[in-house]
Amino acid sequence: MYTETARPGAPAPESDAGTAPAAPPGETAPRIVTEDATIGYHGRVVAEHLSVAVPDGSFTAIIGPNGCGKSTVLRALSRVLPASAGRILLDGKAVGSYPPKEAARRLGLLPQSSLAPDGIRVADLVARGRAPYQNLIHQWRPSDEDAVRAALEATRLTELSGRLVAELSGGQRQRVWAAMLLAQDTPIMLLDEPTTFLDIAHQYELMELFRTLHEQGRTIVAVLHDLNQAARYADHLIVMHDGRVVTTGPPESVITAELIDEVFGLRSLVVPDPVTGTPTVVPLDPRTVTPAP
């Protein structure tokens, strides 16, 4: 999501020098990298010495228990929160060094919750996703109209385009914000719990949309609570616990019963999904499980 408002907090000085780590031969260098970053808000440190790279072109899911720092890290990647130490790089430059509109043409954020202006209609809110492409010379153009129309169609909101956002259900409003992000049309999309407020059918519908966007070449980074959705849609996982990265990698190597027990404190079986073959976490019945020594 693009906004002209100032970022909260005073950003720590970040050098524009330096580039993202070189990629192995035959691979594309990651566009988003954190280097020994310390991140937090209101004087509280949430993550320290965080070094992680998001593979370019990946569908990356950040998973972990509540309060482990997933959403905080995502906000830092989107330049909403500055790093108080270390660096966060976008395309080899400190993410905070980009002018707001240039950054908003490179990456977009779908936050957990947002407040729509009073009296705004669905199409008008979705159209705000085109703000990074407009200036005094380039005002509203046919390409902007096409982007908004496509975003409304993709999120099944065309028939609701004239409705007031305030009149919609929570799930419908979440789809409006997703449509605004689609209209922004960035190569990198950051999603903070994108299926919040959605029933199960609309959850999977939206996740399928993001999978299609990924297949079309976009880099997707999503904070997800549903481990089975993460394993089903993502090809790269970042597992966090207590403000640190526990492990990263593809779901088939990351999602194990041992990791679920260690990170989430949940005894479980990990079995193949009968439809996709991806790892599926099945909690054990605590009444029949022998406590671990």
Image (tube, rainbow, N blue to C red):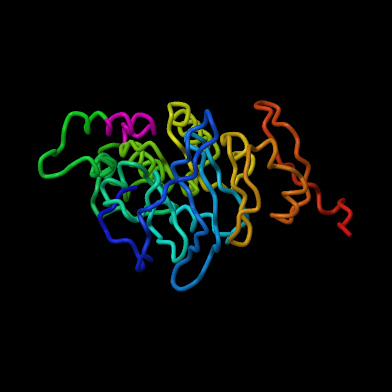
Q: Report the predominant secondary structure element of the magenta stretch.
A: helix
Q: Position of residue 172 (x, y in %)?
A: 40, 42
Residue extending furthest left? 137
Q: Position of residue 243 (x, y in %)?
A: 58, 61
Which picture quadrant has residue 84?
bottom left
Q: Quadrant of the C terminus?
A: bottom right
Compared to 243, does 110 lie above or below? above
* Left or right side of 264 for 29: left
Residue extending furthest bottom? 43
Q: Position of residue 186 (x, y in %)?
A: 35, 38
Which picture quadrant has residue 292?
bottom right
Residue 118 is one of the magenta-drawn residues: no
Over which residues does the magenta segment extend?
A: 147-160
Compared to 258, does 57 lie above or below? above
The total of numbered circles placed on residues is 0
* Left or right side of 279 for 165: left
Residue shown at 53%/40% (left/top)? 60
Q: Position of residue 232 (x, y in %)?
A: 61, 34
Residue shown at 55%/63% (left/top)? 48
